[in-house]
Each structure stands twice: as C-alpha cells, then as structure tokens.
Amino acid sequence: MNNDFTFAIIKPNAVKHKKTGPILAMINEAGFCICALKMTLLTKIQAQAFYMVHRGKPFYDGLIEFMTSGPVVALILSRENAVEEFRKLIGETDPSRAENGTIRKIFAVSVQMNAIHGSDSPENAVKEAAFFFSEFERFYHQEH
Ligand code: DAT
Ligand code: MG
C-alpha cells in the first residue's frame, strides 16, 4: 500500500467561489495523485472534532462557524514526501506571508478563509483521512 499521502480540505470560501477546479488542477500539476475525493457539509460537531487541537484559541469559534458555512471538498493525495510537499504547495497559514504561486497566496481571502487545509504530519494525515474516508473510498494504486 502506498502510505505516502496527505489529507486536504478545499474550504467553503474556495468551493463557493468556483475555485475547486483550479485548485485541483494545481494539485495535479504539482505531481499529486487524487486517491479519494468527497464533497460534504461539515456539522458543527464534526468541525469541532476536526479542529480539536485549536479549542480555546481566540480564532476557534470563528473557524468552526466558517468551516460549517458551506460545502467543502475533502481529499486524500499521494506523492513522494506528500505531507511536506503539500504544505509547500499551499503556503503559509496567513496568506499575506505565503509565497507567490502557492494555493493560499492565490485563493485565500484572509487567515481564516485561507482556501485549503493540509495535514501537518504523516500521523495527522492518517487520523484526518480516517475522519472522512473508509478504506473502500480510497484508490491508492493508480498509474502515474
Ligand atoms: P494551518 O491550517 O496552516 O495548519 P493552523 O493549524 O495553525 O494552520 O490553524 C488552523 C486554521 O485555523 C487555519 O488554517 C486558519 C485558522 N486560523 C489559524 N490562526 C488564525 C488566526 N490567527 N486568525 C484566524 N484564523 C486562524
Ligand atoms: Mg494545522
């Protein structure tokens, strides 16, 4: 099994403004394979569980409200060194600090509405992917 994967979410602002297609194109062009993909509307309980590590921080309530404000697109993405390479592709959390050409630089409208999530470690990629996808919804062995 190919374990070199990361987990991503295209956030509500980007989905709403028809950026799903352009973002997926950038992801493919950067060499990632889409192993799983689903459009879904998070419940408050799901968003709170997903962002549990940020509970108590000043931006937490706003983050939960934003992440449940419209549908998102959840993804499992594979390539060599997937977690680190994907964090490079999306750029800094704060889009004003993100490098030119990164997904957040191009599509984020603020720190909160920063267009895309990417796992920060392989361990969290495993946990986060399990939050959204069963084994039957994953297609790891595709030709590159
Ligand atoms: P990242 O998404 O780059 O891993 P994070 O885990 O620190 O960043 O935070 C999770 C999300 O919470 C982030 O994508 C947007 C939101 N967030 C973080 N810091 C924030 C802040 N200072 N103000 C508003 N939203 C913030
Ligand atoms: Mg994070």
Image (spheres, rainbow, N blue to C red):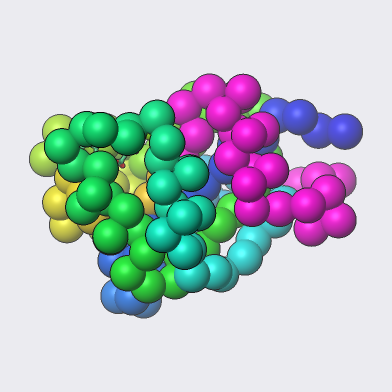
Which quarter of the rendered image does ligand 2 occupy?
A: top left
Q: Which residue is at a point 19% across and 42% down the rendered structure image?
A: 59
Q: Which residues are magenta?
A: 118-144
| Left or right of 134 on screen, residue 56 | left
Against 89, residue 3 (above or below) is above
- Report the front residue among 92 and 27: 92
Residue 137 image point, x, y percent: 79, 58
Residue 125 shown in magenta:
yes
Residue 77, by quadrant, is top right
Residue 47 shown in magenta:
no
Q: Which residue is at a point 41% across and 59% down the rendered structure image?
A: 44
| Left or right of 97 on screen, residue 82 | right
Against 80, residue 144 (above or below) is below
Residue 103 image point, x, y percent: 33, 49
| Left or right of 3 on screen, residue 9 | left
Against 62, residue 118 (above or below) is above
Q: Quadrant of the N terminus?
A: top right
- Report the front residue among 17 and 131: 131
Q: Which residue is at a point 86% across and 56% down the rendered structure image?
A: 136
Against 140, residue 79 (above or below) is above
Residue 88, by quadrant, is top left
Examine the rendering and report whether any part of residue 127 can be seen: yes
